[in-house]
């Protein structure tokens, strides 16, 4: 496994990030342990979760939030693992039904961090990520809270998720004014079918030295050979079926190209992301050990210039960042 620096930091992480959103909702604790053991054995040291993961992502349900962190905490409690992984979690989503049980106030950040540390059974979070931008809380308040957590040794680095390029620039300007490191990573929706971040987010990450960590790198399964799987009898949800029909010509061309070069569609999709130097590590979210194992080959897949060109023809991007993508 060739480890990469996370953005401009000295921290090195694996080129694939283990996403744990399925832990608790679709994957039981025993299987989650097997997945984490297999990931660590394969050299994956970058683990990502969120306080809200593990259920329907809402405190209005009887059970759900916090389970993913609890599974990871129970796994870490077995010993010999904590210092072998880079552990990332998130704050923002509602965790209870009170008015201050969500978003990025100093009040919620402090409580959410303490709760995550307890569930994770650790004394520090390596990368504490804001799950979404909070435009109702000033950056002075947010950064003061994050600085305190760093000073206390509870957080090492701060990251963002689902930020626009403008939000990244605003956050970094405020951090620089405070002589604070600021953001080191951004998690965004990015795959061959969803390339909007190429306009402003990727240029912002490049300029400020953030590592881009794409979520949903397989487009919700569309880029994982979905046509072949349907042909083999795999059932899909109505929403996915509608997407397949909408994108069928592109999916057919994509899967044909993958067969032509002798690679699995999922590996091609991940390798395409890793070809971008701004990308640090796509997040894979396996439900089973088998799914994790299938994705490991992607780090060794090399795509030729001709293949990259054909992928752009099948899944057109913007050709440039903003404003060149839409102005002279």
Image (cartoon, grey):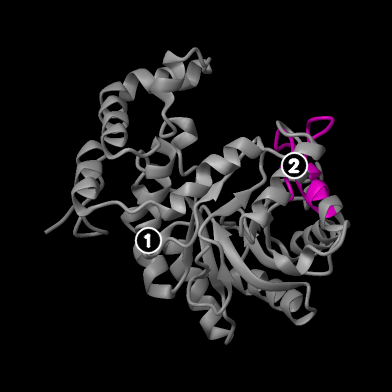
Q: Is residue 46 visible from the viewing direction of this image?
A: yes
Question: What percent of the width, then of the height, locates residue 76?
Answer: 82, 57
Q: Quadrant of residue 276?
A: bottom left
Question: What percent of the width, then of the height, locates residue 115?
Answer: 84, 57
Q: Residue furthest bottom?
A: 179
| Closer to viewer: mark 2 or mark 1 | 2
Q: Give the crowd class for mark 2: few <14, some 14-19, many >=20 residues within 10 Å.
A: many
The answer to the question of whether label 2 and label 1 lie on touching residues, with beta carbons closer than 8 A, is no
Q: Which residue bears the numbered disc 1?
A: 202
Label the magenta part by its dominant secondary structure.
loop
Q: Quadrant of residue 202?
A: bottom left
Point 62% across, 74% down: residue: 140
Q: Give the crowd class for mark 1: few <14, some 14-19, many >=20 residues within 10 Å.
A: many
Question: What percent of the width, then of the height, locates residue 280?
Answer: 47, 62
Q: Is residue 93 magenta?
A: no
Q: How many marks?
A: 2
Quarter that holds the C terminus: bottom left
Of the numbered discs 2 and 1, the one sitting upstream in the chain is 2
Q: Which residue bears the numbered disc 2?
A: 32
Q: Residue furthest left?
A: 328
Q: Which residues are magenta?
A: 51-73
Mark 1 element type: helix
Q: Is residue 72 magenta?
A: yes
Q: Is residue 191 visible from the viewing direction of this image?
A: no
Instruction: Answer left or right for 76 relative to 25.
Output: right
Whether residue 309 is situated above or below residue 9 in the rendered picture: above
Whether residue 282 is situated above or below residue 86 in the rendered picture: above
Point 51% across, 44% down: residue: 295
Which one is in front, 257 or 206? 257
Instruction: Answer left or right for 137 relative to 229.
Output: right
């Amino acid at each position: 496994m060739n480890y990469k620096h996370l953005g401009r930091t000295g921290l090195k992480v694996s080129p694939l990030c283990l996403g744990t959103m399925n832990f608790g909702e679709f994957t039981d604790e025993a299987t989650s342990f097997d997945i984490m053991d297999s990931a660590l054995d394969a050299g994956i040291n970058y683990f990502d979760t969120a306080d809200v993961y593990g259920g329907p992502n809402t405190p209005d349900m009887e059970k759900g939030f916090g389970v993913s962190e609890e599974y990871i905490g129970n796994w870490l409690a077995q010993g010999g693992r904590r210092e072998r992984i880079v552990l990332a979690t998130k704050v923002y989503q509602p965790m209870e039904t009170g008015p201050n049980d969500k978003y990025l106030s100093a009040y919620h950040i402090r409580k959410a961090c303490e709760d995550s540390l307890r569930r994770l059974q650790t004394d520090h979070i390596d990368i504490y990520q804001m799950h979404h931008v909070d435009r109702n809380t000033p950056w002075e308040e947010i950064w003061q809270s994050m600085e305190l957590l760093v000073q206390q040794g509870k957080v090492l680095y701060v990251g963002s998720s689902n930020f626009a390029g403008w939000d990244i620039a605003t956050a970094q300007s405020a951090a620089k004014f405070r002589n604070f490191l600021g953001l080191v990573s951004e998690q965004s929706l990015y795959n061959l079918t969803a390339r909007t971040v190429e306009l402003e987010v990727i240029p912002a990450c490049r300029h400020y030295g953030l590592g881009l960590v794409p979520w949903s790198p397989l487009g919700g399964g569309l880029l994982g050979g979905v046509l072949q799987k349907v042909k083999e009898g795999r059932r899909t949800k109505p929403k996915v079926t509608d997407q397949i029909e909408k994108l069928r010509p592109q999916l057919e061309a994509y899967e044909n190209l993958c067969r032509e070069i002798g690679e699995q569609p999922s590996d091609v999709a991940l390798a395409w992301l890793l070809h971008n130097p701004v990308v640090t590590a796509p997040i894979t979210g396996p439900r089973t050990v088998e799914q994790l194992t299938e994705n490991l080959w992607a780090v060794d897949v090399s795509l030729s210039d001709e293949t990259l060109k054909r992928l752009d023809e099948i899944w057109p991007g913007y050709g440039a960042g903003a404003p060149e993508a839409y102005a002279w």
